[in-house]
């Protein structure tokens, strides 16, 4: 009888130890929240994060915010309840940064924000918080410089001004705001006269980029010399409309994007896009994990020192093979 009792107690102990081992033999757990899984650039970024974290031995799970901030807030709270060791968050809305920062601070969870940058003041509320991304103003400047590097510097019809349409991402997003502003600023800073024929919100979406460009080509026709797109997905959509209208990129119209997606690199190589700007997803994912590990090791950050930037790179037909 005593032997039976001893065996039962041993089994209970084994089960108890197994129950306590929910973190898979001591593996640290990381929760990653992406604003929308079907965003082409964030898919590349997400895959890079997954590969890097798993290679380093972390137990990582991902959540799709479906472009719904309320849903993402719930996902953050669920991760906190689960007791994850760290969070990597790609916010749905930068305007929600105050709430996100407050939530992770109250939970004491080391957090890395990616791709969508809050203000320095918002981040300063929590010293275990870092932002990893790129300087969106630089990407916009590079788009403008791609146009200035063309033989006629964007003035295809020679009337002394550069007439353009702007297909913007989400105007609430700081990247969209800065790319929109600085792409044109690069032209005016170079002494060029510009004419904005249209600015429409495309929400980073290929189909919306196609529709906006088709409507503008129908309305403005040959007046359009440059199509600025805040990302490559919208630029590829715009290209479909440009080709359908019988226009030829780099001959009677210019087209630039941002991200250096594989599809866009192919179009640049084939002469169907004037250029794009490399938004280094792998470089940013690597930096995000590095910062997360520093936080897990106990690092804290002072106000004004919480942003880590990965440089953009201009991609043209001359150097596109370096990125393919």
Image (cartoon, rainbow, N blue to C red):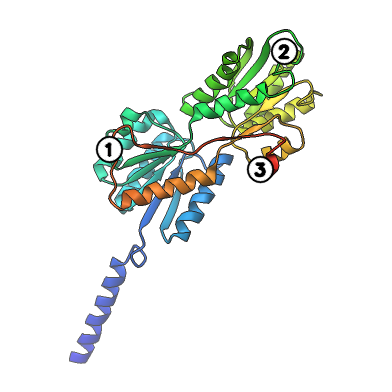
Quarter occupied by residue 301: top left
Q: Which tag, 2 or 3, sits closer to the chain's start?
A: 2
Q: Nearer the viewer, mark 2 or mark 3?
A: 3
| Residue at 41% over, 58% down | 58
> What SS does tag 3 mark?
helix
Against 170, is 40 above or below?
below
Picture coordinates of residue 124 (x, y %)? 29, 33
Residues tagged 2 and 1 counted as in contact (Cβ below 8 A): no
Identify the residue under disc 2. 220
Quarter occupied by residue 205: top right
Decide: few, some or many residues near mark 2? Use Cα within 10 Å; few <14, some 14-19, many ≥20: few
Q: Residue furthest left?
A: 2
Picture coordinates of residue 164 (x, y %)? 66, 16
Q: Residue furthest top?
A: 159
Identify the residue under disc 3. 262
Alpha-carbon distance for marks 3 and 1? 37 Å
Quarter occupied by residue 222: top right
Q: Is residue 173 visible?
A: no
Decide: few, some or many residues near mark 3? Use Cα within 10 Å; few <14, some 14-19, many ≥20: some
| Residue at 47% over, 49% down | 286
Identify the residue under disc 1. 126
Picture coordinates of residue 51 (x, y %)? 51, 55
Q: Is residue 207 left or right of residue 77?
A: right
Of 32 and 67, nearer the camera is: 32
Alpha-carbon distance for marks 2 and 1? 49 Å
Alpha-carbon distance for marks 2 and 3? 30 Å
Q: Is residue 128 left or right of residue 30?
A: left
């Amino acid at each position: 009888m005593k032997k039976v009792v001893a065996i039962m107690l041993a089994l209970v102990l084994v089960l108890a130890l197994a129950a306590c081992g929910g973190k898979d033999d001591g593996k640290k757990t990381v929760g990653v929240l992406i604003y929308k899984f079907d965003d082409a650039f964030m898919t590349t970024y997400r895959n890079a994060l997954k590969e890097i974290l798993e290679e380093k031995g972390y137990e990582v799970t991902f959540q799709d915010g479906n472009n719904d901030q309320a849903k993402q807030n719930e996902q953050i709270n669920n991760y906190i309840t689960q007791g994850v060791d760290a969070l990597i968050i790609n916010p749905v809305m930068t305007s929600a940064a105050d709430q996100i920062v407050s939530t992770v601070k109250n939970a004491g969870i080391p957090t890395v924000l990616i791709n969508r940058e809050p203000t320095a003041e918002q981040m300063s509320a929590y010293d275990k918080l870092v932002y990893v991304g790129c300087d969106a103003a630089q990407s916009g400047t590079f788009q403008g410089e791609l146009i200035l590097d063309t033989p006629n510097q964007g003035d295809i019809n020679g009337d002394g001004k550069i007439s353009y349409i702007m297909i913007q991402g989400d105007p609430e997003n700081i990247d969209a705001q800065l790319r929109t502003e600085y792409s044109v600023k690069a032209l005016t800073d170079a002494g060029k006269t510009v004419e904005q024929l249209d600015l429409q919100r495309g929400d980073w979406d290929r189909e919306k980029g196609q529709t906006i460009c088709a409507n503008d080509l129908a309305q403005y026709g040959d007046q359009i010399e440059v199509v600025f797109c805040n990302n490559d997905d919208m630029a590829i959509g715009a290209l479909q409309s440009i080709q359908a209208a019988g226009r030829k990129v780099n001959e009677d119209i210019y087209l630039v994007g941002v991200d250096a997606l594989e599809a866009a690199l192919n179009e640049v190589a084939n002469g169907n896009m004037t250029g794009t700007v490399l938004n280094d997803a792998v470089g940013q994912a690597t930096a995000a994990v590095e910062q997360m590990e520093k936080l897990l090791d106990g690092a804290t950050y002072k106000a004004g020192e919480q942003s880590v930037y990965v440089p953009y790179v201009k991609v043209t037909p001359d150097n596109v093979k370096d990125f393919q």
